[in-house]
Image: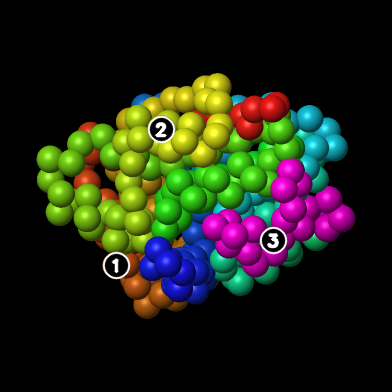
Amino acid sequence: MDQHGHDAAVIGRHYDERTPIEDAFRNGQTHMWYWYDEQDDTPLPEAVHRMSRKVCETLGLRPGERLLDAGCGPGQTAVYLAQTYGVRVTGVTLSRVEMAAAAARAAANGLADQVRFQLADYMALPFADGSFDAVLALESLQNAPDAAGALRELFRVLRPGGRLSFSDFSLRANDEPERIRKFMTTLKLTELPTLEQWLALTEAAGFEIEEYTQCGPRVFGRKAKYISAASERRAELVAQFGDQALASFSQHGLGFFAPRKSQVGYVVVAARRPHR
């Protein structure tokens, strides 16, 4: 545990426990979805991949570039980026379950030489200054004990002119603090910045912000569609993991749904380390 009370092992176990079901349910992706409206009948895995594309497109990746996937999950996003953009990906995670799943996914896609994964904490990365052309933090800064410190560390490992894109939850209204508290406890969040605070943290770390958006209504605001999708696939998941495991997974995730749709947002921020 570090000076901020950050216990990397606790975060690792959190994802060790949740990843197998999330991986199966969302096809190797553990982040949020993006649905345009209630009539959008896009299946959940594709709605999640839609979010991957939305965030990753802001990076402007080019073939041969070195990308750090900070909080890589089970590896599907890294595989997609390597296949689509021809980049070399290094993914880091605190979860041994995620790392194993990600490495297996890369190998199955013939990308073991182009995509690699390792156990590492983005609060203190084992990479030299300027090691990467781009950094992706797809819904992973939420677990930082100190978001400002995490952003400074990502700044350090980027070359001058390198790019950062991240997405994460944001606070839109704290009129019912108990709902927000349940949400944060469930997701192991230390902070829940507003959009303005996310931008200020990014700039304070030394970045120049180039693009940002707040798309909460199409993300957290579509939580009812997620519940519907989960219900439709319940029998399949029970057959794979067992009724007890699925019930425990669902019970531990109840706090996620506590806030009202208007209280939790979702931000996408693209920024650059200045050339000088």
Which portion, as a residue range, is magenta? 108-131
In three-dimensional space, the C-alpha distance between marks 1 and 3, rounded to whole angstroms, equals: 36 Å
Q: Is residue 111 magenta?
A: yes
Q: Amino acid at mark 1?
A: Gln
In the image, 108 versus 160, the foreground residue is 160
Q: Is residue 2 magenta?
A: no
Residue 259: x, y in percent? 22, 46
What residue is rendered at 55% in x and 22% in y? 210
What residue sits right under mark 2 in the picture? Answer: 200
Tag 1's secondary structure? helix
Neighbourhood count class around disc 1 (C-alpha, 10 Å): few under 14, some 14–19, many 20 upward? few
What residue sits right under mark 1 in the picture?
Answer: 251
Question: Which three-letter amino acid code belongs to the residue tagged 3?
Answer: Pro
Q: Nearer the viewer, residue 96 or 244?
A: 96
Q: Earlier in the sequence, mark 2 or mark 1?
A: 2
User: Residue at label 3?
Assistant: 126
**Residue 204 in sight in this render:** yes
- Badge 2 amino acid: Ala
